[in-house]
């Protein structure tokens, strides 16, 4: 698909190259937890260390409403579950749990789990949206060429994965992600350098779903290390 035209009024991404992106994002999560509001978590290989740091810095999440941007359609105790990752690294380490936890029920039929999330999100203001970046440029479970990208009339949807593990996914839709008050990406490692350059160095395009977060009304913050930033053009 052709690149999406990039409106001049949309600010460019804020690239923050730091030594330990997970630790830095953990501090951001802790600060938001102390402030309260709604926090949307992500899965993948990177955020576990951020969740551990957040629990250490802010053991009281009693003012937080917790959400997940996407989930694999597996039971909550499955090692593939994004909820299980957060339970092990964050929730089990808190002294005061969140006031409410909106787990995506991956054990349900995908249609039912997506409908449940869509209904739960009605009228909800999302204060902090944490996202990861896939090597193919996906965010949440919005993959290049996936039908989930075309779901703009609802807050959540479901569909197939674009990368292994090939498990059906439930995900917040693009408009839902773009509606968040704060959008933060966490990524690191040389293996993500190509995706970083495509998502945050070029124009937004459906070929790189993560780049479409930049069409939100708030600046997108990207926390990454030198290796992940190695293929970005100097500004």
Image (cartoon, rainbow, N blue to C red):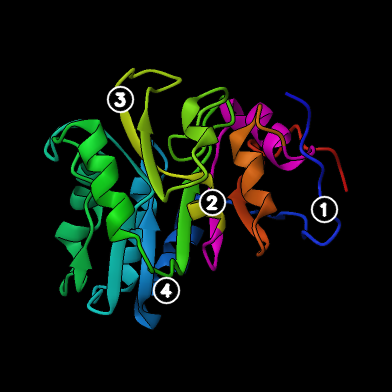
Sequence order check, earlier mark of 3 and 1:
1
Q: Residues within 10 Å of mark 3 (few under 14, many from 20)?
A: some
Task: Report helix, strand or loop for mark 3.
Answer: loop
Q: Which of marks 4 and 3 is nearer the N terminus?
A: 4
Secondary structure type for disc 1: loop
Tell me which residue sits at (46%, 45%) in the image.
173
User: Disc number at residue 168?
Assistant: 3
Category of crowding for the residue at label 2, using alpha-carbon neighbours closer than 10 angstroms: few (below 14), some (14–19), many (at least 20): some
Secondary structure state at the residue bearing disc 2: helix
> Which residue is identified by label 2?
175
Q: Distance between the residues labelled 4 and 3?
A: 31 Å
Q: Distance between the residues labelled 4 and 2?
A: 22 Å
* Range covered by the magenta-colored residues: 179-204
Q: Name the residue under label 1.
A: 7
Work out how far the residue at label 1 is from the one at label 4, CA to CA, in angstroms: 29 Å
Question: How far, Cα to Cα, is label 3 from label 1?
Answer: 34 Å
């Amino acid at each position: 698909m052709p690149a999406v035209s990039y409106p001049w009024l949309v600010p460019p991404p804020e690239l923050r190259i730091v030594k330990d992106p997970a630790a830095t994002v953990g501090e951001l999560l802790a600060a938001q937890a102390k402030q309260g509001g709604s926090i949307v978590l992500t899965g993948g290989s990177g955020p576990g260390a951020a969740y551990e740091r957040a629990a250490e810095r802010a053991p009281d999440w009693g003012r937080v409403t917790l959400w997940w941007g996407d989930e694999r359609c597996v039971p909550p105790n499955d090692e593939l579950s994004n909820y299980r990752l957060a339970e092990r690294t964050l929730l089990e380490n808190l002294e005061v749990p969140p006031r409410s936890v909106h787990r995506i029920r991956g054990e349900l039929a995908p249609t039912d789990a997506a409908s449940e999330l869509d209904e739960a999100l009605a009228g909800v203001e999302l204060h902090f949206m944490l996202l990861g970046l896939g090597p193919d440029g996906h965010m949440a479970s919005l993959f290049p060429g996936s039908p989930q990208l075309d779901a703009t009339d609802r807050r959540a949807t479901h569909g197939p994965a674009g990368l292994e593990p090939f498990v059906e996914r439930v995900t917040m839709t693009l408009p839902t992600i773009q509606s968040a008050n704060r959008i933060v990406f966490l990524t690191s490692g040389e293996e993500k350098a190509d995706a970083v350059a495509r998502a945050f160095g070029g124009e937004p395009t459906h070929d790189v779903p993560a780049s479409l977060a930049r069409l939100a009304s708030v600046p997108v913050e990207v926390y990454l290390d030198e290796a992940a930033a190695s293929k970005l053009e100097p500004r």
